[in-house]
Structures are given as C-alpha cells and as structure tokens.
Amino acid sequence: MKIDPDIETNKELVNHMGYIYGHEFENEILKMHPFFIENPLALVDQKTIMWLNEVIWNPKNPRFRYIYIPGDFSSQVQVDLLVTNMMGALISKRRVIPIFENESGRSIYLSLLESKNLYLVEEIMSRKYFHVIDEELKKVAIEFQNHYKKYNDSKIGFDFSLNEKAVIMLNGHGSAGNYTYFYGDTVISGSEIVKKLVDMKLPKNSIIKLTGCFTACTLNISTLSIEQIKKSFLNGDLYQIYYDDKNESFLQQFYYELKKQMPGFCGRVDGYVGAISDQLVSNVLTKKGQLTTAFAAKVQGSDGTLLLKREDARFSFYPLDACFESAS
C-alpha cells in the first residue's frame, strides 16, 4: 500500500523533508548522504528509508512535534484518531511523540504495539482505508507496530525542558462555530481542554495547533465560488472564505480562554480553514499557486471543493509579547 505515490525519487524525498523540517534540515541530509545529490532521480529504496528513519527518529534530533488528544481514551474514536495520525506521521516521515494525561491513556496506546494486538491495529486501519484489501491492511498494521516499537517515545503531561519550543498538534473532530471537540459520543469543550493543558503544566512558549476541522471558521460552507476562494487564498484573504463577524471561531474562543486561565502564556495558537486531512494527499494548492502533495484543508464553495495546503490555510493568535520562535 503506497499512500503517497508522488514521492518516488530521492530528489522528491529530500524536497519533502525540506517542506516538513525546513531547508536547514534538507541541507543537513544532503551533506550526510551525498548519494542524494549524486543520484537525484534514483527511486527511493528501503535502505534509504531506513537510513532516514534513523536520522529523524534519533532521540537527539530536535525536530519533532507532539500529538495530544484530550480525554481518557474511553472512546474508540479517540484511539482511531491517534493511530491514524501516527500512521500519517510515519508515512510523511514526520517525527511525532504522543502526549497523554495519565498512565491509563498511554497504556492503551502501548498495548497496540504488542504483537498479540495486531488485529486491533488492522481493524483501525480498515476503518480508515476501507477500500484496501485485508492483505495490504495487515502490512500497514505491521509497519505501524514495528516502527513505533523501535522508535517509541511517549509522555504523560508536559515535562519539557525549559528551553524547548514545543509544537503541539491538538487533535479532535470539530465543526465551524462550535467550541467543542467530539470523538463519537465523547464531547470535550474548549474550556475543558484549556484546563487540562494548564493542569498538565503547558509551557508558556508552546505553539498549539488546533488541527480539528474548521477550527478557524464560523461557517462550514462558503457562498464563494471555487475561483473566488482560490483568489482569496492566493491573496491572503482567508477570512473571506468561512467567516462572519457575528460569531467567534473555536480558535478565537480557545485563545481567549487560554489567556484567561494562563495569563503568562506567550506562545501561539493556530487554527485552520476547512476540513483537515490526517494523511498526505495529492493535488493540493499552495499559497504560491503550485500543486503539491501535503496535509490538506478541504474547502467547499458554492460550486465545488478545493484542497489547500494545511499550513497555508492557517490563522494564528498570539500576544504582542510573543515569546515563541517561528515555526510552521
């Protein structure tokens, strides 16, 4: 099962690493592995993938993000969301570390890495990739287990070093103008999530990414046409797409509540336009007007849909005395 068919050559793989981790890291791996420069059009092989995994997942590598799904994992939807996001990270070569509120949540995750529970991972994958045959699902499930057994790391709470600029992907299912994340029958309000973060000792300089759907929106469907949406996107006028000034978005309410409960917070909170993908997809429009393969935000206009690069479809809230360093 090749989820990202667009990345086939060494050059494409290196460019993708630059997109995820920045040009500094791209230059680093070119120096570390001259084969990339000498054979840019060679097809990516398993040896190259294994080498890159060792570089990315080395404990000393500072380029990683955290995934946090609030709650006690009593809902299967929460477990499914974590696994599919971790799988998406594996495919895209993005190093991520899951954060849990307590040992119970982490135990559920770690149990999925046990060989005897391979069938559980397969079941989760089947709900995500329902069009894929069982044999291929098993391969993906085995890849998931083997990868996170070898490179496993997880945390309970935010026991970060003082110098760390933590980037936290706060995952959940959302809808426009709704101040909650929902996981099946489990619903958690934005203010509850903020309290959990504060109780878990969230670092004041964190970058929080609200990666649920429509977190920066007050409307689900735009009255604009696809061409109008595209024009607004390329001109940097995202607010025109899914926003009215009569209501507040999840992002706005979340940020104001965070500043209320944690006055010293000087980091950044990001929200997104549209429905968010947790896997790489093709034919995604960037703010430079190019098509690429990336995590996407799917927007719906009056006459169709359009895929935007997720990080280009981002709004940010931060205080004037922001203490974070620039991060994508």
Image (spheres, rainbow, N blue to C red):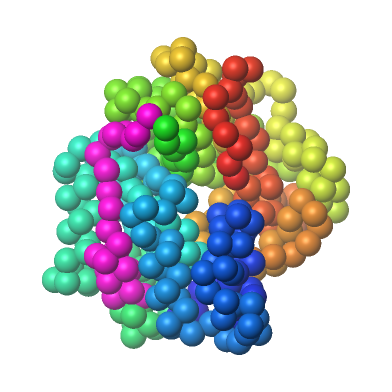
Q: Nearer the viewer, residue 4 or 30?
A: 30
Figure quadrant of residue 283: bottom right
**In the visual, does 113 lie left or right of 30?**
left
Residue 166 vertical position relative to residue 248 in the rendered view, above or below: below
The image shows residue 125 at horizontal and vertical percentages of: 36, 68
Which residue is at a point 48% across and 20% down the rendered structure image? 265
Which residue is at a point 81% across and 57% down the rendered structure image? 289
Asked whether the viewer can see residue 5, the reply is no
Q: Nearer the viewer, residue 66 or 104?
A: 66
The image shows residue 101 at horizontal and vertical percentages of: 26, 36
Q: Quadrant of the N terminus?
A: bottom left
The image shows residue 104 at horizontal and vertical percentages of: 16, 43
Asked whether the viewer can see residue 92, the reply is yes
Which residue is at a point 50% across and 34% down the rendered structure image? 207
Residue 88 vertical position relative to residue 233 in the rendered view, above or below: below
Q: Which residues are magenta?
A: 140-162
The image shows residue 249 at horizontal and vertical percentages of: 59, 29
Whether residue 148 appears in magenta in the rendering, the answer is: yes
Q: Nearer the viewer, residue 280 or 192?
A: 280
Which residue is at a point 57% across and 76% down the rendered structure image? 34
> Number of callouts in the render?
0
